[in-house]
Amino acid sequence: MSRKKKIPIIFLVLFLLAGVITTAQESPTRWFRSNAGGMALEETQSRLVAMRNEYALGIRSASFGELPEYLLPYYNTGYLIENRIFYKNRELIRTQWLFKNIRGGTRLNAVIFEPENIEDSEEEKYITGFIEIFDERSFLTSEYRFYEDGGITRIDYVSNNNLITNATVFILEDTEENEGNKDFIKSYADYYRYNRSSSLRSVERIFYRDMLIPSNSPALITFPRHVMDAVGEEFITGGRINLIPDFFGDTFVQVDSRIIHDTDERGRVLSQTFYDDEGEILWTISNTWLNNRIVSTAKIEGSIISLAEYEYDSAGDRIMERNYTNGVLERVVRAEGGFDIEELYLNNVVVLRAVWEGGRKISETRVRN
């Protein structure tokens, strides 16, 4: 082939590539009727028609130049970029980015919320949300979680036979070697045990560093974010991963200590057993369930038995908590019209009454008897 014939062919190829790039950049948005989970249920004729529903979803192809800066390190030139915008009652709820391979398999899923007016605020604000990384088979391998206080965790998952067998949690912290530089430090790992029907029966957490577990900790088991979404956030935080009452106190754990969570066939935590680094039991917490709610939880620590009993209203909200030590009533907390009324008991008689609003104590009164 002569040089004169090669030049037109090169221009033709460049022209076609430019057309593909332009088409990707100007890809129209397809609109769908959606549900609370953001699924594309039914395609609609236009954005206007989709917005008539409670939930609406827009999906379009995007170009590399549109990606937020925090997603650039995860991009591969072989990926296709998809952008999704999710609305509830015509209000934008979230913006989602997906990286997919040529076969349509998901390699990245990200939802990041950027704080508004970040430049005008004197208080330092941080992005929140998550980034999920998948392998070539679309199995979850890593997950980054971003918190309002600026904290970032990385969770590495290992799977076998389509089941997650363990999750290792790393926390972004300053390193001792390089002051001012941050790195992900391994903190603990959760190991999942299943029965023959693949239902979760227990979770063992092993600690790789000394740390304090605050009472009322919001999460005791590390589940993938999308698993939590599948069963509902309310059920996860109030059920499968129940809160430890403040009444039980904080727990200080050391390297090689561990906590084992035993669950029933529905994934509800029945008991938690804490072992020290030598394998000795330090305490055990047992839960009693009724209608997917914990009605009592007891902690046995040596000769001390701490008990918390709960009552709920018709909506399932907790309205009463009673605390006992070795069978003696010590504390009652009840919800009344947006306030929490806390009463402390001595010899079965109220001696102190405090009123809380939004987690802040607004009054305290000693009761004379």
Image (cartoon, grey):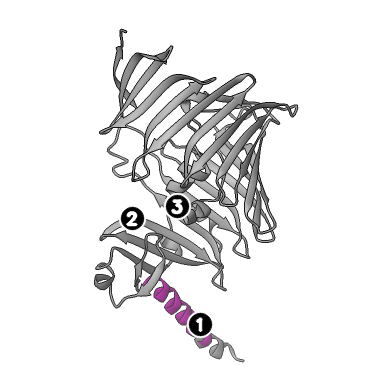
Can the viewer see residue 27? Answer: no
Image location (x, y in percent) of residue 281? 69, 27
Q: Residue at x 52, y 83 (%)?
A: 10
Q: Earlier in the sequence, mark 3 or mark 1?
A: 1
Image location (x, y in percent) of residue 264? 60, 48
Against 53, residue 319 (above or below) is above
Q: Amino acid at mark 2?
A: Ile
- Marks 2 and 3 sit apart, C-alpha to C-alpha, by 17 Å
Q: Is residue 301 left or right of residue 291?
A: right
Can the viewer see residue 41? Answer: yes
Q: Is residue 143 left or right of residue 46?
A: right
Against 282, residue 88 (above or below) is below
Against 106, residue 68 (above or below) is above
Q: Is residue 228 magenta?
A: no
Q: Which residues are magenta?
A: 9-26
Q: Earlier in the sequence, mark 1 or mark 2?
A: 1
Q: Amino acid at mark 3?
A: Gly
Q: In the depicted view, which residue is nearer to us: 248 or 27?
A: 248
For mark 3, what is the residue?
232
Dominant secondary structure of the residues highlighted in magenta in the image: helix
Q: In the depicted view, which residue is nearer to us: 172 or 279?
A: 279
The image quadrant where one finds the N terminus is bottom right
Q: Amino acid at mark 1?
A: Val
Are discs 1 and 2 less than 8 Å apart at CB?
no
Kindly identify which numbered label has been placed on residue 13: 1
Residue 115, image quadrant: top left
For mark 2, what is the residue?
93
Image location (x, y in percent) of residue 284? 62, 30
